[in-house]
Amino acid sequence: MKKIFILYCLFILIGCKTERRNIEITDSNLETAIQRFDIDFWNIDLKRPIKSMNNLYKKYPHFLPLYTEQALMVGQWNSEECQEILMDYFFPDSIIQTLYNDCLKQYENIDDLNEQLTKAFQRANTIFPQKTIPKVNFHVSAGANPNPILYKDSLISLSIDNYLGENYPLYQNAVFSYLRYNMRREKIVPDIITIWVTYNFPFSLQTGQLLEEMLYRGKIMYLLSALLPDESNANLIGYTPEQWQWCIDQEKDLWMTIVEKKHLFSTEGLLRTKYLNDAPFTSYFSQDSPGRCGVFVGWRIIESYMKNNPNVSFVDLMNNTDYKSILEKSTYNP
């Protein structure tokens, strides 16, 4: 009886496992070290602000203008208005001081993040050698910009004040509960890699059918899982383990609902929002479902496609926008 139970457990684990292709790293010399703009900015000498800002610009010529204009939204870094806002309101603000100090404390040591990013970009460089591997910064936006990641000129910068843990006090009354779960350290590397992938392989709307963006998102998830093979599927998609298991258990019903409601080839924009965007749950399913169930199904279809078409490379996959053909060749049948 005990042996039967063990075999049953193994069957369940195998059935829940997703397909990931192994990537053999060809250039182990490539390293990613996150630049600590957040620390350098906070260490500006308030007694000599102009000189300090000029020195900061010399060190971060591409990012400082982006930071003041798009992250803090206080104008050009060298304008009188910007410097006045920073010196009179930003740095003296007690909430910003608390936020900044908590960020610097939580992210004093980032060796683990540097190692994860390095390995991920080494894999990315192996399969996409023509793509530029970006520099990565940390910054603090203090809630001025809801977008936690900025990307420009082969530079990605992440606002670490969005990753202080779901129970961080300042989040409780400012952020919906279903979003807080992913505001944690474990999501930093997956989020950075996701931004890099989507930037290099942007979505191109064709007919507007749900199928297109659902499978596009599935391609992003499949590649993400290959670049970060040690990450759990739940963490990659941003689900709790229980939410992931719910999707595995309900996969057949999820697919049948999409098909029976004739949503797959619908061009109604609201459908894409409900199936693919963050929400407390996916409204076409029960309230026990997590949000973005369409992304989960899209990922599973792409896994089936890659498993049943072993000659398709990562490059082939990411460049293929014939989504009807992908669906047909996937022979997806949960």
Image (cartoon, grey):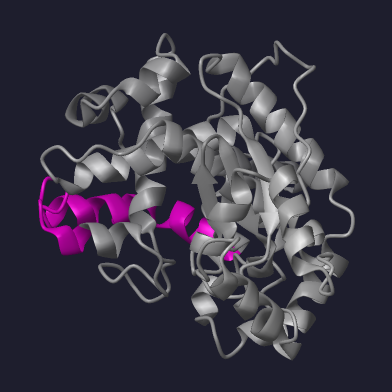
Does residue 300 appear in the picture of this structure?
no
Q: Residue at x 14, y 37 (%)?
A: 206
Q: Residue at x 53, y 80 (%)?
A: 177
Judge from the rendering whether residue 98 lies leftward or rightward of residue 280; answer left or right: right
Residue 313 sits above or below residue 123 on the image: above
Numbered marks: total? 0
Using the rendered view, name the quadrant where residue 84 is placed. Answer: bottom right
Say if the magenta span includes residue 314: no
Residue 236 sits above or below residue 159 on the image: above
Q: Residue at x 67, y 80 (%)?
A: 90
Taking depth in this image into account, of 310 and 186 the one nearest to the observer is 186
Say if the magenta span includes residue 251: yes
Judge from the rendering whether residue 189 lies leftward or rightward of residue 175; answer left or right: right
Residue 24 sits above or below residue 150 on the image: above
Taking depth in this image into account, of 67 and 86 the one nearest to the observer is 86
Q: Indicate the position of residue 25 as horizontal and vertical percent values.
A: 70, 16
Using the rendered view, name the quadrant where residue 220 is placed. Answer: top left
Taking depth in this image into account, of 262 and 5 the one nearest to the observer is 262
Helix, strand or loop for the magenta stretch, by majority: helix
Q: Indicate the position of residue 133 as horizontal and vertical percent values.
A: 61, 27
Does residue 6 appear in the picture of this structure?
yes
Q: Residue at x 53, y 61 (%)?
A: 76
Magenta-colored span: 242-271
Q: Indicate the position of residue 181 as horizontal and vertical percent values.
A: 60, 70
Q: Indicate the position of residue 19 as horizontal and vertical percent values.
A: 53, 30
Residue 32 sits above or below residue 51 on the image: above
Q: Check the picture and name the quadrant holding the C terminus.
A: top left
